[in-house]
Image (cartoon, helix red, strand yellow):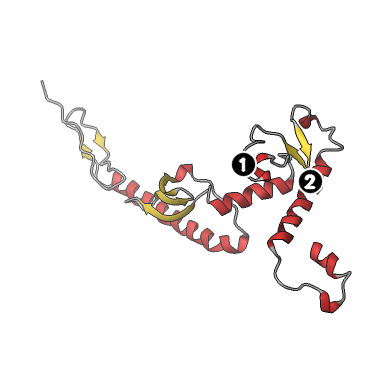
Amino acid sequence: MIRFCRNSKLEKSCRVTDILTPDELKEAEKRILLIVQRTSFVSGKNEGLKNIPYVVDQNGLLRMKTRLTFREDTQDFKFPVILPSDHPVVTSLIISKHKELLHCGRVTEIFPGKDGVTRLVKVKTASGEKLRPVQRLYSLEINAVSSEPLRHRALKGTRRLSQSTEKNLRNKIADPVKSKVDNQPVLNQKTRLGREIKTVKRLDL
């Protein structure tokens, strides 16, 4: 937008049409942060700024005073820009940084169990690869187009699990056996892996 405004004031032969330079991106970032501060902190009277020592830089941005003032480092690090926590621009900035640094992680490999259900996955983060249980993962939002194949796959897996459950129930009630203790029919139970559960034989004392 800044380049467009500048090019509109120049002749066609003098207009810049290349890719955006780092200086232009930095200037655009400062303009956006300035707009966020002006809409959130009205003339510095916001309640959140009462206990925060701050200075105003040459661009009009409110920057926080820290103990790193005399340290040899960049100005952005020594005097961070003060931003509200509930602004949509700040939320988008945090999400973009999480995606850039892979804080949330990216699933690179899944480990299904013997019953076909995945309970463990390998996640790649900025610090390396880690194994995490599925319960500790957070499902990100996806659009309807890309989620359609996943929905069919999930329904197919549900049908497969329901068929397996029905088969296990049939196995449990297939051959009732007689108990030597009370002469009552006992169900032939099996574990989820298909192993038969043997009943405890008591001594006739």
Indicate the secondary structure of the residue bearing disc 1: loop
- Residue 20's place in the image compared with 162, above or below, is below
Q: CA distance from mark 1 to mark 2?
A: 28 Å
For the point 39% across and 51% down, which residue is it? 117
Mark 2 lies on residue: 36
Mark 1: give few (<14), some (14-19) or many (20+) Cα within 10 Å. Answer: few
- Residue 66's place in the image compared with 171, above or below, is above
Q: Nearer the viewer, residue 76 or 114?
A: 76
Number of labelled discs? 2
**Drawn side of residue 29 relative to residue 7, left or right:** left
**Drawn side of residue 67 relative to residue 173, left or right:** right
Quarter the C terminus occupies:
top left
Mark 1 lies on residue: 72
Q: Amino acid at mark 2?
A: Val
The image quarter containing residue 80 is top right
Coordinates of residue 90 in the picture (x, y in percent)? 70, 46
The image quarter containing residue 14 is bottom right
Residues marked 1 and 2 touching at CB (< 8 Å): no
Q: Amino acid at mark 1?
A: Glu
Indicate the secondary structure of the residue bearing disc 2: helix
Whether residue 1 appears in this view of the structure is: no
